Image (cartoon, coloured by chain):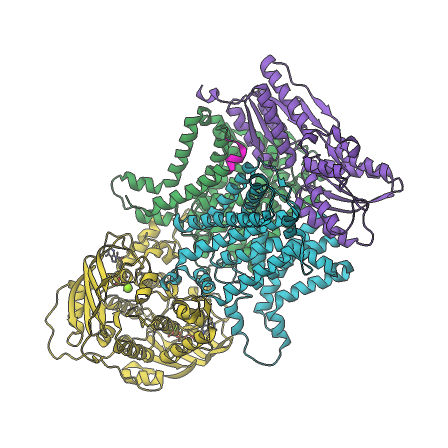
Chain colours: A yellow, B green, C purple, D cyan
């Protein structure tokens, strides 16, 4: 029996036809995967379902009733459609509990009952197994924790259809497992779920049906059980994508980056000095992956190396010379560059053009007298990286905020690469990137390493860490617990280190699973 | 951006930072830093001149603070939603002069003339604020421009209304609102306390209040969460308009005369109260408690410097420096550990 | 009491110490206080009635015996005057009187309406056949503006219909605004320039003179009159660029008021009202101007 | 949030909308909407009074606009980084009075007294602005509070400096900067054109300009891209301070006197010019071109209404309404298709 029936829905933005007569059918108690490359129109379709956008044409029927296209988001919520958007919709200054119950706070004598609000939130968070303080302001949470709050918020709505737009993009495997347990429970209660993810292994493991979109059009749908991951990829990308473990291009060069017993001055969050006495080495032409659970301290380390946070003790050496970093500016000058994990808050100038976004740190060599920008050279630079990274965009002058998330990420990668750094740190480089583009990004990182750049990759997707790394360093609660060879490491082995700090003997010859 | 985050009396933050543990004097000091700064200032003034610390002087300060403090409560809401209102001074003058005009010229002597004036002043303010709100939400003109326009429009209208002249000749019941007492508390102070308490409760304990925070924190997210953003925005401007009208009524009762120049420059003092109180001009953080402290700081300063015989030109220099120092201290206390 | 030791017994609250008129008054006050050997505290209400009341309340708390006030508004200060009287503090008003207090407040001042009238009378006398007049007014809504305008209007009306106000604009008491506004007014009537420009303070008259000069009219073609008789204006009168300015004798006002205040403290004698007549200073009676000595 | 995005002369957005195609009058009108609004206003004034459309009057308007327009160029930068400066009027007065004081009292007659005054006024402004910038970046006090403090501190200091009185008695070379011509163009206008051109070029074509936009667009992202955010912020406040000082010098030359009350209320007029010109108070969008149009709109309005002999009180009402209408029209033209 169908719960949701979308037919012939179209939507255009100035200059883009984002959706072109799309259809989608979701049954009761079904987990339905919505698949497609970056910019295929998945988020746009979801926003039409939640009434954040009005469709240009087409009908959305819910529970057999056609929905009014002029509905407000509130009415759709009341009908039983809850949405977790790709871009977070949280209020940074409000607490976790308030964010979960905004507009639906429990009341006593007409006034908000703070005690019950806190208790309800704590109860639900406990039920979902989320270790969050309901009173903490959301602005203090990590991206992963914010994602969990979004999920918890959707649960408070008692919806019949929950739409999740890339809920796992910011999560590491432990949280992903937890989310999947939650979804299984929802399914058992007859709730339907629309699930968007670029992690096809997840889709294969837990979705019932799928719909694939390409360039704003409907391509195919069917039972997940009937297709293999390669088939899904072909439907999405129009070709098959080879996903291979990177082969080392030669013997590693000399040590470029050396981190010696580094401890941060003030932890980013209000916790007592979490990261402690970290040691690490990266050689020229080597890609080192950092693995760890959410909050293990990998991002903190990256920020220390990049000069974004201050060091209390220890030292960072580049080419065996000590680096004195007061700000990211010093790091960039020395040849260290970082792609931050939170692209909206720390990466993008959303209203500014792609050109301005990409070229900002590289302007100096493009300017006469260090100030007078040569715009032609700038355009050429941007064009080079557009081609290299296959960024889909109308023109260099389009505001970056109008790109799909994956394409934004590519622009930020381009920003870092354009600087030709000695050391490149990428924090969650493929968060929200589709599988085709992900392979391209890995390829680009490999090529970059081949040119002798020392690369640090932070990723919460173990498969990704294993695919790109020559070496894998495992973090647990702020300390390095293992330093493994990328070729012999196994997912199970890594998980064991991440969760307990101690390795488990891994069965030899264990094959690496595709993504 | 650069106007760095100021959170001070943010309920969410305070709760998060305070797990029930034993008394920690430093944490206590950090939490109540603005009050402590104010107390310090009061102690200094009191040490220099003992008359500063008399009840009579406290009431003097509070009477003066009441007039703009009432508007500052409304401004807290406006700044919370990320808006701004520079028209409050002009609207205050227009509303109070319109009310005085009706009472003295149209209605004539009446036992309830105070009630008529109170009603008209508040309603005119409400209507004016509503117009600002509609211009923001419906014409999509930035709040700064709308209220800057409003500032000159209302002032011009006030001057036209009675050809620039003041209106006086109010009866005793009317004057009572500016000069009378309720149980030893001067009436304007009582009204101020009422408004502040109400403003605090609504912000803290009602859905409306929570939605005000939400709109300022992230307007688009608020819309997607089902908040009627346009309604919140319009209502907030209407409320501050009504409070400006109320304050205008009290001021005219206190002065015994409704002046066309009344309230000039109030916008800056009121906004300063809110921002000194820890609210961020980008919206989403702040509270009525902080605003009260900010308003009091300004009131204590200007009174204390007079009492200390600081020369009038020099007073301006000192006030400016202390305000900056207070906010710098606030930031320092908030971010530095023991 | 510690608070009483260094307390000034005389507190003077000025309406607006950014206006040259009151600045001049303050200087004379300080000079006279030095001569009499009294300690005086000076306050600036910054043109805000509410602040003036608060200042006076603070002064009373601090132990003043006599308060001299140049009110922002005649009516707004009545209650404050009553309260001060109740606490045994004597009040004297200068420049502008206080209306509506329970017992009349002694006043030392010159009437603003009469001052405006003096300007108009000069116009009527100088142009028997009538004249086209431009009026540049000071801060809209302030009582000095309202009263001076009133005097000008009454005086010109008394002269008959031949005296026409062809433009009346405010320049908010500011020199730069007066320059711009006068320039604009002159542009709008370039072919039929006005005969007289009446500026309701001297600062604005300085700006108007600049505009007249820049527009290419000589001092004979368009006559400019000011108000307050500040030294700059007197110098222009002396040189013939400007015609006249109204002298309200701020120095004499404040010196008289201060002497009354000191008498009250020393002998307990109740302060008396003293009324000064505003005088129109022209090149003929320059010597009568109180600040003529300051002209370089 | 509610102060809806206003992008008009944002280089990033404009180019995107213009693929080289054949002439489309509606697109043209949309792109140049603010200029068209200004021309419409000029046409109306010209139709009502022919004197309005004379060269002499145009020079009048421009001379007046020059004084605050110079500061508005600096304010464009300040607002672009998401800051605000309400101290410009006071700093203008302080700088020009300090310069006049030195020239008339300390140095005495000299053939280069104008140069000394120009230098001192600009440097004092620069120093004052630098102090504001340091307080923002180093003490982490919000810009609004810093410059509000600055506003009263500089005004107080000005009044102290010459005991509240004006300073006059400048020589002819000094006065030339306010009243002389360069090839028929009055000197202040020439300086204004120079400052505006320089301001535009730096913003549009230099790395520094790019970094200003970046800081306003997202300060954290700018920092992580290697921009020295503190330097940009401090320098921007220093520049607007220097421009306020320069403007103060020109004003004193124009009036023949440096006054303690000079520049009062300029802050609002200058900020209004920038915001009418399409900049967003949250930073990251706006430009010098838009600011010029905004400043001109204000200048044309106040000149035109005086020339039309609209009464002073009524002028205020009309100016307020037209400013709101202009911005509403701008928004409408930008978002609505043919
Ligand atoms: N507000 C908007 N204005 C203009 N274009 C938009 C807007 N929102 C989306 N688009 C465009 O619509 C297309 C579809 O975008 P959408 O965000 O739906 O893709 P997606 O499938 O969710 O991609 P991703 O996997 O990267 O999240 C893209 O080309 C995007 O640039
Ligand atoms: N259990 C905890 N107790 C205290 N602080 C914690 C805890 N978990 C995380 N943190 C804090 O969170 C931060 C770690 O987050 P960081 O982003 O560096 O980790 P990460 O491994 O990159 O994880 P993520 O995948 O979320 O980016 C540190 O500043 C640390 O102080
Ligand atoms: Mg998407
Ligand atoms: Mg991380």
- Occupied quadrant, residue B49: top left
Q: Is residue D219 above or below residue B329?
A: below
- Which residue is situated farthest in the right direction here? C129
- Of D11 and C125, which appears nearest the observer? C125
Q: Residue at x 86, y 40 (%)?
A: C127
Name above or below for residue C63 compared with residue D47.
Answer: above
**Ligand 4 picture quarter:** bottom left
Q: Find residue B53 and report its image quarter.
A: top left
Tell which of A167 and D176 is nearer to you.
Answer: D176
In the visual, does D50 lie left or right of B134? Answer: right
Q: Which residue range is magenta in the image?
A: B310-316
Q: Could you say where residue B55 lies in the image, as x and y percent from the top left? A: 46, 26
Count of numbered circles on the image: 0
Q: Is residue A429 magenta?
A: no
* Position of B37 relative to D318 (above/below): above
Please, which residue is most extreme toward the top here?
C267
Q: Residue furthest front?
A: D111
| Image coordinates for residue A146, horizontal then vertical, percent | 33, 61
* Position in image of residue C39 (x %, y %): 54, 22
**Majority secondary structure of the magenta segment?**
helix
Is residue D277 visible in this depiction of the protein? Answer: no
Q: Is residue A405 visible?
A: yes
- Which residue corresponds to the image point at 59% horizontal and 49% vertical from the top-left? D112
| The C terminus of chain D - image quarter | bottom right
Q: Is residue A49 left or right of residue A425?
A: right
Residue at x 29%, y 45% (from the top left corner): B337
| Closer to us: C175 or C120 | C175
Give percent across and percent down for residue B245: 59, 43
């Amino acid at each position: 029996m169908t719960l949701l029936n979308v037919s012939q829905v179209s939507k255009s933005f100035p200059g883009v036809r984002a959706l072109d007569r799309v259809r989608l059918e979701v049954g009761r108690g079904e987990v339905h995967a919505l698949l497609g490359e970056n910019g295929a129109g998945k988020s746009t379709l979801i926003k039409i379902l939640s009434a954040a956008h009005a469709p240009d044409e087409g009908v959305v029927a819910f529970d057999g009733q056609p929905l009014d296209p002029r509905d407000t988001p509130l009415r759709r919520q009341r009908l039983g459609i809850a949405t977790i958007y790709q871009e977070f919709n949280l209020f940074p200054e409000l607490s976790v509990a308030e964010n979960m119950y905004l507009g639906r706070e429990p009341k006593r004598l007409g006034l908000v009952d703070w005690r019950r609000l806190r208790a309800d939130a704590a109860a639900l968070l406990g039920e979902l197994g989320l270790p969050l303080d309901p009173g903490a302001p959301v602005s203090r949470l990590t991206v992963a924790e914010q994602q969990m709050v979004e999920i918890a918020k959707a649960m408070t709505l008692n919806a019949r259809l929950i739409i999740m737009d890339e809920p796992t993009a910011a999560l590491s495997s432990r949280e992903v497992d937890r989310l999947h347990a939650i979804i299984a429970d929802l399914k058992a209660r007859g709730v339907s779920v629309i699930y968007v993810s670029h992690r096809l292994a997840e889709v294969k493991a837990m979705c019932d049906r799928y719909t694939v979109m390409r360039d704003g059009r409907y391509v195919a749908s069917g039972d997940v059980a009937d297709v293999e991951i390669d088939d899904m990829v072909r439907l999405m990308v129009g070709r098959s994508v080879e996903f291979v473990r990177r082969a080392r291009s030669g013997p590693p060069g000399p040590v470029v980056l050396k981190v010696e017993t580094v401890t941060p001055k003030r932890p980013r969050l209000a916790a007592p000095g979490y990261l402690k006495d970290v040691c690490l080495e990266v050689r020229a032409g080597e890609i080192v992956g950092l693995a760890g659970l959410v909050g293990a301290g990998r991002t903190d380390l990256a920020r220390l190396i990049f000069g974004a946070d201050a060091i209390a003790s220890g030292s960072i050496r580049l080419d065996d010379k000590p680096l004195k970093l007061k700000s990211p500016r010093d790091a960039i000058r020395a040849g260290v560059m970082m792609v931050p994990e939170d692209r909206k808050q720390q990466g993008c100038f959303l209203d500014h053009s792609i050109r301005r976004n990409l070229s900002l740190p590289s302007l100096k060599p493009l300017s006469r007298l260090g100030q007078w920008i040569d715009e032609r050279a700038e355009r050429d630079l941007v064009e080079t990286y557009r081609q290299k990274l296959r960024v889909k965009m109308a023109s260099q002058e389009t505001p970056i905020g109008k790109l799909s998330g994956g394409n934004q990420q590519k622009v930020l990668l381009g920003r870092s690469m354009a600087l030709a750094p000695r050391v490149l740190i990428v924090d969650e480089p493929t968060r929200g990137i589709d599988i085709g583009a992900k392979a391209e990004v890995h390829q680009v990182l490999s090529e970059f390493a081949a040119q002798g750049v020392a690369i640090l990759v932070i990723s919460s997707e173990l498969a990704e860490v294993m695919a790109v790394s020559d070496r894998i360093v495992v973090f647990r609660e702020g300390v390095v617990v293992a330093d493994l060879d990328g070729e012999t490491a196994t997912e199970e082995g890594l998980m064991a280190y991440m969760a307990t700090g101690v390795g488990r003997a891994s069965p030899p010859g264990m094959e690496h699973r595709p993504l | 951006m650069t106007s760095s985050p100021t959170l001070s009396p943010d309920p969410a933050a305070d709760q998060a930072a305070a797990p029930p543990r034993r008394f920690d004097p430093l944490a206590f000091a950090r939490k109540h830093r603005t009050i402590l700064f104010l107390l310090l200032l009061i102690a200094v003034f009191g040490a220099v001149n003992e008359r500063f610390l008399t009840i009579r002087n406290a009431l003097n300060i509070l009477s003066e603070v009441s007039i703009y403090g009432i508007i500052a409560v409304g401004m807290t809401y406006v700044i919370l939603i990320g808006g701004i209102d520079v028209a409050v001074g002009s609207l205050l003058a227009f509303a109070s002069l319109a009310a005085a005009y009706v009472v003295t010229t149209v209605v004539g002597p009446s036992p309830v003339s105070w009630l008529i004036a109170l009603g008209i002043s508040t309603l005119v303010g409400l209507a004016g604020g509503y117009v600002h709100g509609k211009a923001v939400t419906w014409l999509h003109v930035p709040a700064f421009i709308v209220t800057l326009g409003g500032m000159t429009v209302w002032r011009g209208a006030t001057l036209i209304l009675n050809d620039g002249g003041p209106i006086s000749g109010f009866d005793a019941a009317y004057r009572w609102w500016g000069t009378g007492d309720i149980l030893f508390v001067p009436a304007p102070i009582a009204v101020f306390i009422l408004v502040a308490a109400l403003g605090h409760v609504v912000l803290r304990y009602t859905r409306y209040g929570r939605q005000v925070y939400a709109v300022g924190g992230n307007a688009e997210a608020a819309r997607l969460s089902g908040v009627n953003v346009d309604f919140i925005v319009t209502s907030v401007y209407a409320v501050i308009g009504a409070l400006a009208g109320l304050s205008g009524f009290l001021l005219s009762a206190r002065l015994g005369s409704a002046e066309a120049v009344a309230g000039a420059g109030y916008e800056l003092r009121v906004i300063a109260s809110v921002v000194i109180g820890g609210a961020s001009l980008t919206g989403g953080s702040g509270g009525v408690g902080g605003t009260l402290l900010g308003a009091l700081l300004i009131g204590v300063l200007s009174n204390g410097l007079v009492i200390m015989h600081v020369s009038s030109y020099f007073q301006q220099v000192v006030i400016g420096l202390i305000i900056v120092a207070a906010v710098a201290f606030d930031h320092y206390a908030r971010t530095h550990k023991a | 009491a510690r608070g009483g030791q260094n307390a000034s017994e005389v507190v003077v609250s000025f309406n607006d110490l950014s206006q040259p008129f009151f600045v001049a008054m303050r200087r004379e006050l300080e000079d006279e206080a030095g001569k009499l050997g009294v300690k005086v505290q000076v306050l600036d209400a910054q043109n805000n009635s509410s602040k003036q009341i608060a200042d006076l309340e603070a002064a009373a708390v601090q132990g003043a015996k006599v308060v001299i006030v140049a009110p922002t508004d005649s009516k707004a200060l009545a209650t404050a005057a009553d309260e001060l009287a109740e606490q045994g503090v004597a009040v004297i008003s200068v420049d502008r009187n206080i209306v509506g207090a329970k017992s009349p407040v002694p006043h030392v001042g010159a009437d603003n309406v009469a001052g405006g009238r003096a300007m108009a009378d000069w116009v009527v006398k100088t142009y028997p056949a009538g004249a086209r007049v431009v009026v540049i007014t000071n801060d809209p809504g302030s009582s000095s503006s309202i009263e001076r305008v009133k005097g000008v209007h009454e005086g010109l009306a008394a002269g008959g219909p031949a005296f026409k106000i062809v433009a009346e604009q405010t320049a908010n008491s500011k020199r730069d605004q007066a320059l711009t506004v006068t320039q604009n007014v002159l542009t709008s009537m370039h072919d039929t320039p006005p005969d007289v420009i009446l500026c309701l303070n001297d600062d604005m008259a300085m700006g108007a003179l600049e505009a007249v000069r820049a527009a290419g009219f000589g001092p004979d073609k368009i006559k400019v009159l000011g108000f307050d008789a500040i030294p700059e204006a007197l110098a222009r009168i002396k040189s013939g660029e400007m015609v006249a300015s109204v002298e309200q004798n701020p120095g004499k006002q404040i010196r008289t008021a201060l002497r009354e205040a000191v008498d009250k403290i020393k002998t307990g004698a109740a302060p008396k009202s003293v009324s000064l007549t505003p005088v129109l200073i022209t090149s003929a009676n320059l010597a009568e101007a109180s600040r003529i000595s300051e002209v370089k």
